[in-house]
């Protein structure tokens, strides 16, 4: 059976969304999975860890627990896996802090970041949804970079 080329992108997108959790640990699969939620309010105002867990096929018990972005990064850095300066490669987890607390994004490798909980960081920013592509890690005022690390899951 022949398929037209116009249906191919849809087939690929569906495969990426439905990828098993083991495949989601690969950066491209995680980014594709996370992109399916851009423009939504899944995971709420401060759901950055939950969003990253979803993208990488993890849960709070085997990924980044709720409200634990800082300690998760510090554990990676203590093992020599943290990096203190940008740019971060595609798929890397980028950790930051601001007056709102601690935050984690997924680097798209081109100076932009896939982020959950955006409205908790800067209400009314961008398209007004919780999950957006943002121009820098942690768009909250007075934010600073903690560092970045490759996703530690295999």
Image (cartoon, helix red, strand yellow):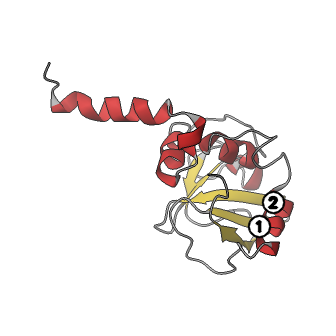
How far apart are the two marked residues, 2 and 1, measured between alpha carbons?
6 Å
For the residue carrying disc 2, how many other residues have a C-alpha within 10 Å: few (<14), some (14-19), or many (20+)?
A: some
Q: Is residue 2 left or right of residue 127?
A: left
Residue 141 spot, x, y in % from top left: 75, 67
Residue drawn 54% across and 47% down?
30
Disc number at residue 154?
none
The outermost residue toward the bottom is 85
Q: Can the viewer see residue 35?
A: yes
Residues under numbered marks 2 and 1 in contact, where contact means CB atoms less than 8 Å apart:
yes
Residue 66's place in the image compared with 141, above or below, is above
Residue 86's place in the image compared with 74, above or below, is below
Residue drawn 69% across and 44% down?
53
Residue drawn 60% across and 67% down?
136
Residue 88 spot, x, y in % from top left: 57, 71
Residue 66 spot, x, y in % from top left: 84, 45
- How many marks are shown on the rendered structure? 2
Residue matched to label 1: 76
Q: Compare residues 123 and 130 and report the one nearer the observer.
A: 130
Q: Is residue 146 left or right of residue 106?
A: right
What secondary structure is found at the residue carrying circle 1? helix
Residue drawn 13% across and 23% down?
2
For the residue carrying disc 1, how many other residues have a C-alpha within 10 Å: few (<14), some (14-19), or many (20+)?
A: some
Disc number at residue 72?
2
Q: Is residue 135 left or right of residue 116?
A: left
Q: Is residue 47 left or right of residue 37?
A: right
Q: Picture quarter containing residue 147?
A: bottom right
């Amino acid at each position: 059976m022949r398929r037209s080329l116009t249906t191919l992108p849809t087939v690929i997108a569906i495969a990426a969304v439905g990828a098993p959790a083991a495949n989601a640990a690969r950066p491209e699969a995680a980014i594709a999975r996370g992109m399916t939620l851009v423009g939504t309010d899944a995971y709420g105002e401060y759901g950055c860890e939950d969003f990253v867990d979803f993208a990488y096929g993890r849960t709070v018990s085997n990924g980044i627990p709720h409200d634990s972005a800082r300690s998760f990064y510090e554990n990676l850095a203590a093992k020599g896996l943290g990096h203190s300066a940008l740019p971060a490669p595609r798929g890397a987890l980028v950790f930051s802090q601001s007056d709102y607390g601690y935050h984690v994004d997924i680097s798209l490798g081109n100076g932009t970041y896939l982020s959950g909980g955006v409205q908790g960081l800067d209400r009314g920013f961008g398209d007004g949804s919780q999950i957006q592509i943002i121009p820098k890690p942690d768009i909250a005022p007075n934010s600073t970079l903690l560092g970045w690390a490759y996703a530690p899951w295999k």
